[in-house]
Image (tube, helix red, strand yellow):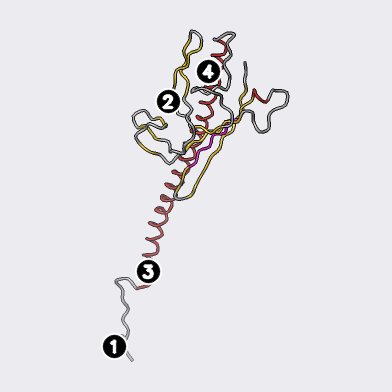
Amino acid sequence: MSNVGSESKFTLATTGFTLLETVVALSVILAVVVGPVTLITKGIFNFVATKNKLVAANLAQEGIELIRLVRDNNVICDFLNGSAGWAWNRDPEGGNLTNTSREVDANSSKTINCGAASLSTPRLPLYSGQPLRFNTSTGFYGYGGDQETVFVRKVDIRVPPDNPDSGIPASDQMDIISTITWNEHGTPKSLVVRERIYNWR
């Protein structure tokens, strides 16, 4: 018996892709494309969250520093006035800072006259809950910028503090609690910085 001239009943396809090969190829391509896109998207969300935390931390610390500047200016005025008393916790608008919630803005100041000298000190309006604005020309946050932000700053001032240090008169101590709140992708966030300052005169 010879095989010469006999035809094979089955022919094998030697070109093209089978359905299984196509599915495997598409799976590999999707894995290569979707993986990096997912990582990039997650990275963008993490970048925004990290940026917001960093901005909030700086805004909270700025709130502390501006209240400290008011205290320092008050102590300087007390020194320059000589025998006339100038309270270390005096509100630049008049009266004293005791238990109150304020807004602070490095771009808004008032001139106070103490003796022969004049000092520029931050204004401390009562807290209203309005969001901070970003000034695109100066790069500063405040209440007069051209771009509204997601950040709200509240600075609580406590004189005397809730738990004063022993050995120092409670009336010579001030707690400053600077709170920044914002929404991030629909989730409320907050950051709190707390510091105690003293009447060092």
**Above or below — where is 78 with respect to 8?**
above
Q: Where is residue 6 in the image (x, y as percent from the top left)?
A: 28, 88
Q: Residues within 10 Å of mark 2 (few under 14, many from 20)?
A: some
Q: Which of 189 and 67 is in front in this view?
A: 67
Return the residue at label 2. Answer: 108
179 within the magenta span: yes
Specify the principal SS of the magenta part. Answer: strand
Looking at the rendering, the stretch of residues picked out in magenta corresponds to: 175-181
User: Hey, what amino acid is under mark 4?
Assistant: Asn
- Which residue bears the numbered disc 4? 73
Q: Earlier in the sequence, mark 4 or mark 2?
A: 4
Residue at 46 percent across and 39 percent down: it is: 129
Q: How far apart are marks 4 and 1 (CA)?
A: 110 Å
* Residue in front for this viewpoint, 55 or 23: 55
**Of the numbered discs in the image, which one, if any, rests on residue 6?**
1
Badge nearest the viewer, 3 or 4? 4
Q: Which amino acid does label 2 sit on?
A: Ser
Q: Tell me the quarter of the picture where residue 48 sits.
A: top left
Whichever of labels 1 and 3 marks the residue nearer the N terminus, that label is 1
Instruction: State the SS at label 2.
Output: loop
Q: Does the magenta stretch include residue 65?
A: no
Counting from the top left corner in percent of width and height, residue 198 is at 62, 23
- Which labelled disc corresponds to residue 123? none
Q: Nearer the viewer, residue 62 or 127?
A: 127
Q: How far apart are marks 2 and 3 (CA)?
A: 65 Å
Identity of the residue furthest to the left in this view? 5
